[in-house]
Image: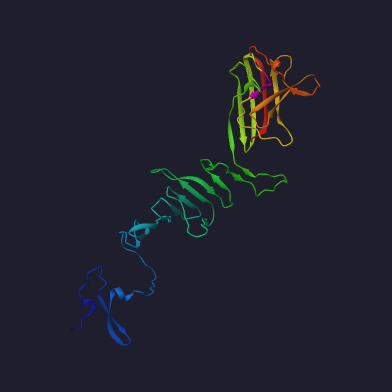
Amino acid sequence: MADAKISGLPASITPLAGTEVLPVVQSGVTKQVSIANVTAGREVSASSFTPSSATIPTNGLFLPATNAVGIATNSTEKMRITATGVMYLGSLGTNLSFTNGSAVDITGSGTGIAGNGTNLTLGAWDGPMVFQAGNSGSALVERMRISSAGNVSIANGNLVIGTAGKGIDFSADGQAAGMTSELLDDYEEGTWTPVLTTNATDFTSVTYDAAVYGLYTKIGNVIHIQGMMRTDAVDATGATGLPIISGLPFTASAGTGFRDVPISISRVEGFVTNNPSSAAVFENTTQIYIQYRTTSNGAETYLPLAAIGTGADNNIMYFAGTYTAA
């Protein structure tokens, strides 16, 4: 073959198949090597590397959008760095994105973040960690933020405890000698209906005024109650025992050295002969026992059945107190 300048050779067909050969000098002897073997198994260094195709490769780099770089495995895009510096892992925009700047965004509706080691750590270089979420087709909205000081803020929503008996644990605080729990595991607000009855044979009938009400707030196992009872007619035929108010929203706990929990009374009207002076939640029940003084300075005792008025606007009692639920 006559000598020829490289510039005089015909252009090769690209892309190369890898079977093309080049001359190399190996152990002082000129030999041929295929293009595919020029760098195979060898460390390659370069000042830069720029992918040129927008087509997703089987495994490798490609250009999915203007000024963006993607990485594909198994012919599927697995990571992208956008023109603005956001890095997406997993399906585009559905799992984890690290934004340029100081914040870290958990953005989406994927299955979350999983690690197969012993720990998984997310962190922001400087500033808050921001968690965002959005419905399909809508813009992402901040839902939670962890500040650089460690404070957690919920932007728009509630902290929902998914398992009964779980809550907020305050065990990092100091404890008194008699401590039995430092877990705040319940909060509830609601209404209840005071019911006039007896602890033995009930009244034949009781007609209540429309103004009767009961409210409660439960914090842990502590129940705060308030209520107002007013009757418009009571048929006491055949009734026996002591008059009580039932219908408390939670059963009272058993006493330890005491039998009941005091309930304060702020106003009474319409009782016969003796007006109630105090009341008490009885242990292991949802009942309030009514008490009175036989004399102005006498000892308190349970209100007798004969003290219940039977006419309209009788047995008016406003009361409030706190007790512990079982």
x, y percent for residue 134: 43, 44
Above or below residue 150? Residue 26 is: below
Query: What's the magenta region?
Result: 240-245
Which quadrant of the figure has residue 234? top right
Query: Which residue corresponds to the image point at 22% horizontal and 69% vertical from the top-left?
Result: 13
Query: Which residue corresponds to the image point at 28% horizontal and 85% vertical from the top-left?
Result: 30
User: Does the magenta portion include 98?
Assistant: no
Q: Is residue 124 left or right of residue 30?
A: right
**Quadrant housing the C terminus:** top right
In the picture as drawn, the residue positioned furthest to the top comes out as 311
x, y percent for residue 69: 37, 59
x, y percent for residue 92: 38, 53
Q: Is residue 124 left or right of residue 265?
A: left
**Quadrant housing the N terminus:** bottom left
In the picture as drawn, the residue positioned furthest to the bottom comes out as 28
Q: How is the image coloured?
A: rainbow
